[in-house]
Image (spheres, helix red, strand yellow):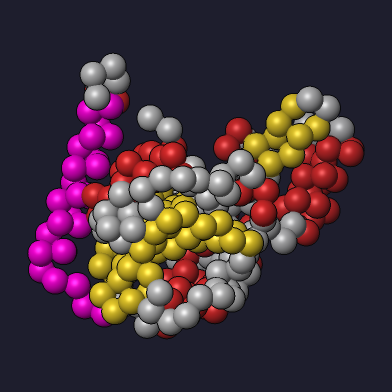
Amino acid sequence: MTDEKKYMDFAKSLVGLRHQDVLEVGGCISPEVITDYEPRSWTSIDVNPKRFEGKTTFNGNFTFTAENMSVTDIKHPDNSFDRIFSVNCFEHVDDLKKGMDEMFRVLRPGGKLFTIFGPIWSSPVGHHTWIEYEGHIYHFMNGVFPDWDHLIKTRSELKSDLEERYDEELAENICRYVYDSSDINRLADGDYEKNLKDSNFRVNLRVRKKRGKKPSKKRREAIIYNYPSCNDPTVTEYLLVVSKGKISIRDTFTMYFGLVSQLMNKILQKVFPRSV
């Protein structure tokens, strides 16, 4: 199963996509994948037009549109969409409050937002380092440097540590990505909680996924000192379902039933990988 289909199945189970006008925020699911979920229309927006390459032409059973656009300035009228679908985007949005306001505006009353995002900045690997250097990929999930060092170390301290493992040029490239990249918004878990609380959305489901062991007391104190809005530095990803207004008891039951079904399917895939 591809990642696209995995996320689409999750959204289908929790909020439903069939016969809905859907706005995808950040990224662009392939139209050939979307067609199996039978939306009425699907509009993808992203600030990087490269995400739309090879996906802008489609003749199928729904209307598909890909637009170079920021979530902080959605060029659509109020109440335009029934659903918003977003995967691994929120940690990249520079003004998340404005983005939340815009998404609320374009959702219809009773509409739902489904999102999974992370790793967030305050997590063990929230620096998102992804560098290609001399034929190798240095990736945040492959232990480029110890967990939380991007929150604890100064630039010079981190560079000094990196130069013990890598050459000077690579060490500088990593530091430049960590401290200078505009690709990450550098929000801690407490910042996301505040943005959510201050928004007009009603929270229907909130799951915080944690990663790894807890930091030592000394490292945790250093993290909190540098990032007071960090409540739990092990929180790495969020799964959220929020709505514009109250949802029905039936919709709530469907959402939680869908969540349980997805979790059970994930367990079965690990136990019986060839039969599920």
In the image, is residue 257 part of the stretch drawn in magenta? Answer: yes
The residue that appears at 67% across and 54% down in the rendered structure is 49
Image x and y of residue 268, in percent: 22, 28
The residue that appears at 89% across and 38% down in the rendered structure is 168
The quadrant of the rendering that contains the C terminus is: top left
Q: Nearer the viewer, residue 1 or 60?
A: 60
* Residue 213 visible in the current orientation: no
Image x and y of residue 113, in percent: 36, 65
- The extreme top residue here reads 274
Please determine whether, in this image, residue 144 is positioned above or below residue 217.
above
Where are the magenta residues, as a range? 245-269
The residue that appears at 27% across and 63% down in the rendered structure is 205
Please determine whether, in this image, residue 135 is positioned above or below residue 52.
above
Q: Nearer the viewer, residue 149 or 208?
A: 208
Please determine whether, in this image, residue 224 is positioned above or below residue 110.
above
**Residue 269 left/right relative to 6:** left
* Residue 226 visible in the current orientation: yes
- Main SS category, magenta section: helix
Q: Quadrant of residue 193?
A: bottom left
The residue that appears at 15% across and 51% down in the rendered structure is 257
**Residue 182 left/right relative to 222:** right
Picture mark count: 0
Image x and y of residue 104, in percent: 41, 77
**Residue 11 left/right relative to 94:** left
- The extreme right residue here reads 168
The quadrant of the rendering that contains the N terminus is: top left
Q: Nearer the viewer, residue 43 or 211?
A: 43
Image x and y of residue 59, in percent: 46, 45
